[in-house]
Image: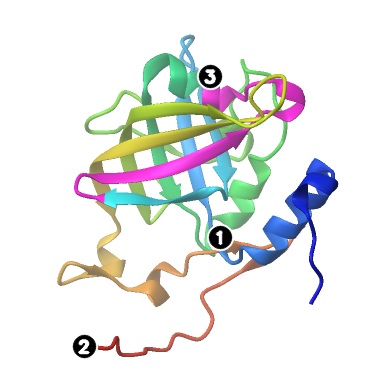
Amino acid sequence: MISIDPKQNSERDNYKLMIGSIIPRPIAFVTTQSDDGVLNGAPFSYFNIVSSNPPMISITVQRPKGRMKDTANNINNNHEFVVHIVDDENVAKINETSASLPADESEIELAKLTAIQSTHVSVPGIKESKIRMECKLVQAIPLGGKAEPSCDLFIGEILQFHIDKEIYKDGRIDPRALNAVSRLAGTDYATIGDIFSIDRPQ
């Protein structure tokens, strides 16, 4: 067994250990809107469930070189965002939105994704997603960094679910029909693969 003290590592080395170990990670494609009305879209794999009562999710947005990303700025400013689950049918287009664009340019237009109006928030979602969740900001928490924060943790409450009827039956989502894509390390992704069940002890 190799033992590593993260305090003796560089930030990049710790990053590589974490993204190589904590796999697979679900991917949230997040749309936000600037004060000027520019629709921003970006994928994040630091993403998970927080609570089901009320339904809440978390997303962490890194601050490269200490600079807050457009997604973080927009969520802080208008307290609304839409989270989409990335699947095998839209992952190629979602990957295009990883490009670094100026704040006044839309990744949605770059990737030729289709904006669709939301029900409870002003931020549009994208039509190409089988699942999207309209969210309002519950809490924003700057974290990490010695001199200044290195990331922003956002906790959002889901106000509305939108689910493709082809993947939904009897209140449940069919994981094979959704075929969500997960993030590994580097440029690697994974699909669902084998599914197996283990009974929980009584």
Name the residue rendered at 31%, 32% in the picture: 117
The answer to which of 180 and 49 lies nearer the viewer is: 49
Give the answer, above or below, for where 70 lies relative to 196: above
* Numbered circle sitting on residue 25: 1
Occupied quadrant, residue 134: top left
User: Residue 163, position in %: x, y?
Assistant: 28, 55
Mark 2 or mark 3, which is nearer to you?
A: 2
Residue for badge 2? 202
Magenta stretch: includes residue 59: yes
Q: Residue at x 40, y 67 (%)?
A: 178
- Label 2 is placed on what type of residue? Gln
Q: Judge whether 128 appears above or below 193 on screen.
A: above
Disc 3, SS: helix
- The part of the image, by quadrant, that contains residue 189 is bottom right
Which residues make up the magenta segment?
52-72
| Residue type pointed to by label 3 | Asn
Q: Residues within 10 Å of mark 3 (few under 14, many from 20)?
A: some
Q: Is residue 46 magenta?
A: no
The numbered mark, 1 or 2, whose residue comes first in the sequence reads 1
| Image side of residue 10 versus residue 96, left or right | right
Q: Quadrant of the C terminus?
A: bottom left
* Whole-percent x, y for residue 55 in the image: 25, 47
Amino acid tagged 1: Arg
Density class for disc 2 (Cα within 10 Å; few <14, some 14-19, many ≥20) is: few
Is the residue under label 3 in contact with that under label 2 (CB below 8 Å)? no
3D distance between C-alphas at marks 2 and 3 = 47 Å
Calculate the distance from the C-alpha at mark 3 to the C-alpha at mark 1: 24 Å
Q: Is residue 4 above or below residue 14?
A: below
Q: Position of residue 99 (x, y in %)?
A: 71, 36
Seen as rendered, the residue at the extreme left is: 170
Q: In terms of secondary structure, where does tag 2 sit?
A: loop
Q: Which residue is mark 3?
A: 73
